[in-house]
Amino acid sequence: MILPKFDYCHEDLVAGLKQVGIDRGDIVFFQVCIDSLGKPKDCSTAEQLCEMLWGALKEVLGPCGTVLVPTYTFSFCRQQVFDIDQSATVSGGWNTFVEFPEYFRRLPNAIRSSDPIFSTAGIGPRAAGILSDLPRVCLGEDCVHDRLWRAGGKICILGVGLYESIFTHHMEAVSRVPWRYDKLFTGYVRENGKLRKEGWIYNVRILAKNGDQDEKSLPAMAAQLGVCKTAPVGRGEILAVSAQQFRDLIVREFARDPWFTAQGPPGDPVEFEELRIAAPRSDVSLPAHASMEQMINNLWRLPRDIISSGYDTALKALATQVPMTIHEYPTGQKCWTWIVPEKWTCYDAYIETLGGKRLFSHADKPLHVLSYSLPFEGEVTREELFKHLYVHSRSPDAVPFIYKHYDRDWGLCCSQNQKSELTEERYRVVIRTAFSYGTVKVGEVIAPGSREECIVLCAHMCHPGQVNDGMTGVVVGVAVMRELLRRRNRRYTYKFLIVPETIGPIAYLSQNEQLIRTLKGGIFLDMLGKDFPHALQLSFCGTTEIDRCFSIALKQYDPDGLTGPFRSLIPDDAVQFNAPGVRVPMLSLSRVLPMSDPDWPYREHHSDLDTPDAVSIKRLEESRALVMEMIDTIEQNSVPVNQFKGEIFCPRYGLDDWYEEHGGSKAFFDIMQMIDGNRSIADIATACNTSFAVAKRGIEELLHHGLVTLR
């Protein structure tokens, strides 16, 4: 390190600290960027300079004072393990003299926080209370800076401006400024030799132009109002501010203008980001009243990752087929325990030999790149490549669909056959991707009924370059809603949701909690194009009215169909509706092999083999008809209340001939015996081992003679 030319000494530091209001017993968050101060007197090494800085702090604060020093590593941002004892502080605009944080954290009695991005070291009686047991949120509530404020601490900065204080960014985070958002970073923390995986939320700034930092407005106002005190030290200055006063100032200014610390005019962050990333666009249109086959053929190739331009294009096209409202939930939005991730864009991804021969690429098939892969460019060994290269577990000729929406890694995918041909020692990998602020989108189609009670149909559309998984459920749902919208006198309200998997229904439900009470139940539609019998997976409860009605409809329409308990046939987004705190009885309908089959749920699942050739339009039509049968059953289900006592005298009402034509006397008397005002038609049909249609016809005959009423 080459030290600058101007002089200052221990006494100058002590005087400067006292002049800016640092006193004995204070809690001080101390940042130092030494370059602007000049040459320290009597210090020929960085070690001596560190000793001088620490000596001045100890002299001013005394034994009851507490010092906190940023030892930031950004480990999770750099895909590195954070070792609490060993990970070194990195330099940045807030710190160009990393020698002092490194010196400080190694001092006896120093402790260090476990934050893998913004770790802080501390010494003093209040250090443990501020740095221990932190929530896994870098800049939000109850972080180090929040605790500093609550403890009445001060911020002292040597050699740089006030904006470099991370406390400012903490306040931007808790104030929810429109040009920052929460982002999850995952990785491993090593403590006492043991590794543990953690996820930390970092409130990052939007990278578009309007998110650039304004380094002048806030410091100027703080100085003008006397909130910030300064004192000359060497060629530069030392400054200090009470965390309470600084917070009050920022809160007031953000209330006036939430863009106060951002450079550039206010605007729509999504639009700014769209201009920045310039994502490739595909304009896809559908003919009016497109068939299920036309919808599949036009949309299936789109790169429909959970938040992507391809997904948006597909949803926009489907909105021309049925009256649709598109709900948007922005990146960083808290959705119960989840956080909406960023938009992901892939411009290009490929692997080639060092001689320039391209082996496979994203342009060939979108599944050749890991969904939500980090960007990467460089030469890698065959061994390193194979750590990031994924193949299908069962089909040697299939390229798998692999995604890591919430893990930070790069990766490519190929078939097992392609991988076996990679015999050279080194390859060139290029993955050009971008992450940006966006919105997760949920398409909602509503067919209003006479009741507020709502039955939900749901399907996901976020599997790029695949058909049976996702798209078949979407097109069947669209076809069902078209038919429902043509009907009059609907008893229930029907709602069809087109979502990206997992985060879509969670975002919708968490931001519309008031609607949950109106949801009577529903069905998740997926994987309906194969030549297998239908598989109906019951809700978490399994015994609700909607479970009974849909089960009896399946038995009547598809006698070979399989019915199974919750999560016994296929994992899908019915889970989100059945989850604790929601408990909407959501079933799922699919055509899948039993879990015991080695090809479960079907051979082409999560691969590039899941094409239109792997699905049957005839099977989709049958599934549409079955869903309508289920809807008819729940629509017509009611509770017959007996207006008779004892066994009915059938000849008096001419019922003898009727029941002989509809299953015989035993079937009729079985039905009659179950009518007591407590059982619905579906309950009676199930108990009597007959179809819903037969039970309904018998009850309608009794209704005609005034022997029952319906409620």
Image: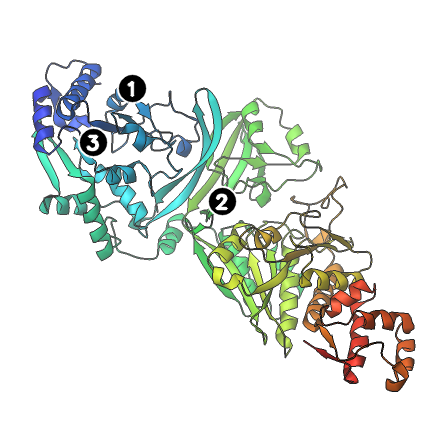
Q: Is residue 67 left or right of residue 513?
A: left
Amino acid type at mark 3: Val
Q: Is residue 210 above or below residue 50?
A: below
Q: Position of residue 88 (x, y in %)?
A: 34, 23
First in sequence: mark 1 vs mark 3 = 3
Dividing the image into 4 quarters, which one contains the C terminus? bottom right
Disc 3, SS: strand
Q: Is residue 266 left or right of residue 590?
A: left
Disc 2, SS: strand
Q: CA distance from mark 1 to mark 3?
A: 17 Å
Q: Position of residue 194 (x, y in %)?
A: 48, 22
Q: Which residue is mark 3?
A: 28
Amino acid type at mark 1: Asn
Q: Is residue 85 above or below residue 305?
A: above
Tell me the mark number nearer the camera, choosing from 3 and 2. 3
Please rate how many residues cluster around mark 3, counting C-alpha atoms within 10 Å: few if below 14, some from 14 to 19, many from 20: many
Disc 1, SS: loop
Q: Residue 346 got which mark? A: 2
Q: Is residue 600 left or right of residue 490?
A: right
Q: Is residue 554 above or below residue 38?
A: below
Amino acid type at mark 2: Cys
First in sequence: mark 1 vs mark 2 = 1
Q: Which residue is mark 1?
A: 109
Q: CA distance from mark 1 to mark 2?
A: 48 Å
Residue 234 sits in which quadrant? top left
Please rate how many residues cluster around mark 1, counting C-alpha atoms within 10 Å: few if below 14, some from 14 to 19, many from 20: few
